[in-house]
Image: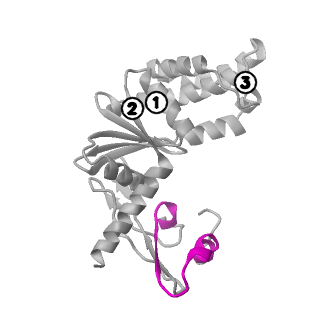
Amino acid sequence: MGQLTSDVFEPALLELVGDFLPSNQVTPVICCGMVGARQGWIEAPYLSVPCKPPGIGNAIGPEVKDPRLDVHILPGVSQNLPADVMRGEETQIGGFLQNNPGFDGAVCLPGTHTKWVQVSAGEIVSFRTFMTGELFSLLSERSVLRHSLVDEGWDEAAFNDACNDAMTSPQHLSARLFALRAGSLLHGLTPSKARARLSGSLIGLELAGSRPYWLGREVAIIGAVGLAGLYDRALTGVGVSATIADAEAMTLAGLSSAFVKMKEQNK
């Protein structure tokens, strides 16, 4: 999205799906996520919590030139206090609820900007965003720590210990981060241990901040297998058993649900 201006979204879409569009009919295309942001194709105004995951009735349609296209963009969700927004995750939540209609608890959507979402009675009640993934990327690629994280190795014990330390005393996080660099210089701390400790420290800090969402609640994690697994193991360390759902599958389920409802409305 960040590489496109509003007039380039339709050509970009056609580059992806043009070969699959029949020439003699109009094909509905349902989109979600940052395509509906202010800097996207066209802004789809947020729904405010508490609300059900946005459906086709909340979608807006940008003007298109190709007569084969009928584009619908689902809106995101916003929260006034504390201020927060999401675009795309609400569709994943909708897909998850389609498959788990009785779910009542917390949904964690790990990623660059991880979301913790309270869901009850089929509605998104409240949520908080944690910049854990972006912090990991910045620290591992642009800070002094990059010199200590030169490979993709991993040490599970180091990850678990760092999670626990960050949750127990989050006020020491910045000192523990620099200790990764000092440890590699003085004590031969390996890149695999340093990388795992960095990840564990940031996820542990996030769990300390999101405690009101997961403590004593049913928890579902919607994410890519590797990252969802890290969160699952971190939650297991504090006695929480989570259900894991694949992010791509939940996105498709949410979009499919919107498509079915659109067909029902058009009958």
The chosen color scheme is one colour
Q: Is residue 186 among what the camera can see?
A: yes
Where 181 falls versus 68 (above or below)? above
What's the distance in space between the residues labelled 3 and 1, CA to CA? 23 Å
Q: Residue at x 58, y 76 (%)?
A: 10
Write down the residue under mark 2: 242
Reply above or below: 44 against 98.
below
N-terminal of the two: label 3 or label 1?
3
Task: Say whether residue 150 is left or right of residue 91.
Answer: right
Q: Nearer the viewer, residue 89 or 182?
A: 89
Question: Dots 2 and 1: beta carbons under 8 Å?
Answer: yes
Secondary structure category for the residue under label 3: helix
- Amino acid type, label 2: Ala
Residue 229 in the image: state x and y as whole percent: 51, 32
Secondary structure of residue under mark 2: strand
Q: Amino acid at mark 1?
A: Asp
Secondary structure found at label 1 = helix
* Residue drawn 27% across the image and 48% down it: 101
Counting residues from the N terminus, which is met first, the one under dot 2 or under dot 1? 1
Q: Foreground: 182 or 136?
A: 136
Q: Quadrant of the N terminus?
A: bottom right
Where residue 157 appears, x then y in whole percent? Answer: 58, 17
Left or right relative to 94: residue 167: right
Query: As drawn, which residue projects farthest toward the top?
Result: 187
| Disc ID at residue 232 | 1
Nearest to viewer (mark 3 / mark 1): 1
Q: Which residues are magenta?
A: 9-36
Tell me where residue 61 sits by quadrant.
Answer: bottom left
Q: Is residue 88 visible?
A: no
Quadrant location, the C terminus: bottom left
- Numbered badge on residue 191: 3
Instruction: Please state if 113 lies on the left or on the right of 137 as rendered.
Output: left
